[in-house]
Amino acid sequence: MKPIVYKIAMERMQILIDSAISNARTDLDLSQRHALLARRISTKYKIRMPYHLRMVFCKKCKSFIAPGINSRIRLGRTSVKSIRISCNLCGHTYRKIIS
Ligand SMILES: [Zn+2]
């Protein structure tokens, strides 16, 4: 793949996820559509989304989950610093270790 195609695809995914997150409060349908488009770009160009984009998708049901709207983000209580993201749609919780 040409580097320019990769760059454009990455930029578009970033823009779509940004807009999905900012629209989640006002227009959930629109934000779901934008999130879906970002996923399609990632599949079409076989580009793995960077972590900060992937974290808005539930690992289990693959839905777009807007932070603070249909997902809950909490800090772990253990000595290992981590954040826990719970999907309000399927109830799945996953952890991200932060250093
Ligand atoms: Zn889920």
Image: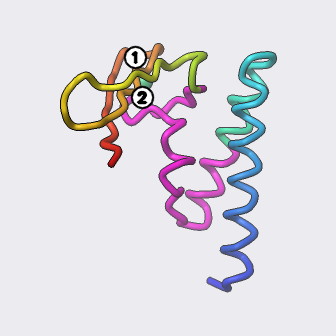
The residue identified by callout 2 is 61
Q: In x, y percent, where is residue 61?
A: 42, 28
Question: Residue placed farthest to the front in the image?
Answer: 79
Q: How many marks?
A: 2
Question: Within 8 Å: ligand 1 and the Cβ of disc 2?
Answer: yes
Is-magenta flag for residue 62?
yes
Real-space Cα separation, disc 2 to disc 1, in angstroms: 7 Å
Q: Tell me the amino acid under the disc marked 2.
A: Cys
At a point 72% along the width and 76% down the height, the residue shown is 5
Pointers 2 and 1 in contact (CB under 8 A)? yes
The kind of secondary structure the magenta stretch mainly shows is loop
Q: Specify the segment rendered in magenta.
A: 37-66
Asked whether, in this view, residue 1 is left or right of residue 58, the answer is right
- Judge by depth and name the residue closer to the eye, 15 or 36: 15
At a point 79% along the width and 19% down the height, the residue shown is 27
**Label 1 neighbourhood size at 10 Å, few (<14), some (14-19), many (20+)?**
few
